[in-house]
Amino acid sequence: MAQSKKSVRRADTLAELMGQCDFVSIHAPLTSETRGLIGADAFAAAKRGMILINTARGNIVDVLAIPAAIASGQLAGVGLDVLPQEPPPADHPLIVAWRDPKHSAYNRLILNAHNAFYSVEGLRDMRVKGAEACRRALTGQPLRNVVN
């Protein structure tokens, strides 16, 4: 069986990136540069049928632009585990579209609470890693995962 050669190319603009990708998964901090970065213009530039996933910060994506992008077919689907306001109000346009069986978003939008880490194992892991970090700091050992 012959293997296909894949290559990685750097996109110079967001529009170029959106136009080339089948999937875009956002993993960025919320900064003045990323606030509202993905919205109607980015969706218009997207490869038709793209799937968007945001597990970063809610305000990076203009969620008000999602229902129209799904309805037009520009986005095939969206997965969000974070929204700009949590919990969102019941009358929020994204929530209204998601709950409406007649809207395309009904079957093509996944909303999840931004707490996917929450489990017995996850809570234990946070306590253990936090205690280990404190021990390392108190005993003068190098700290891991320092973010300045």
Image (cartoon, rainbow, N blue to C red):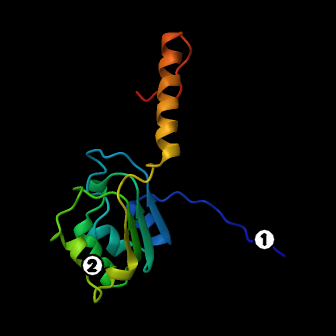
Amino acid at circle 2 = Arg
Q: CA gap, disc 2 to disc 1?
A: 43 Å
Tell me where residue 14 appears, x and y as whole percent: 39, 61
For disc 2, the marked residue is 99
- Left or right relative to 5: residue 124: left
Tell me where residue 24 appears, x and y as whole percent: 46, 64
For disc 1, the marked residue is 3
Q: Residue at the spot x=30%, y=86% of the render?
A: 101
Q: Secondary structure at mark 1?
A: loop
Amino acid at circle 1 = Gln
Classify residue 99 by image quadrant. bottom left
- Left or right relative to 45: residue 92: left
User: Image height check: is 142 above or below 94?
Assistant: above
- Pick whichever, 17 or 102, lies toward us: 102
Q: Quadrant of the N terminus?
A: bottom right
Q: Quadrant of the C terminus?
A: top left
- Pick whichever, 74 or 138, lies toward us: 138
The circle on residue 22 is: none
Classify residue 103 by image quadrant. bottom left
Give the tally of numbered discs.
2
Q: Is residue 145 at least partly visible in the picture? A: no
Classify residue 97 by image quadrant. bottom left
- Left or right relative to 100: residue 56: right
Q: Is residue 84 at least partly visible in the picture? A: yes
Tell me where residue 96 appears, x and y as whole percent: 21, 76
Q: Residue at the spot x=41%, y=67% of the render?
A: 52
Tell me where residue 12 appears, x and y as whole percent: 44, 57
Q: Residue at the spot x=43%, y=49% of the render?
A: 118
> Mark 2 or mark 1: which comes first in sequence?
1
Q: Residue at the spot x=28%, y=66% of the render?
A: 39
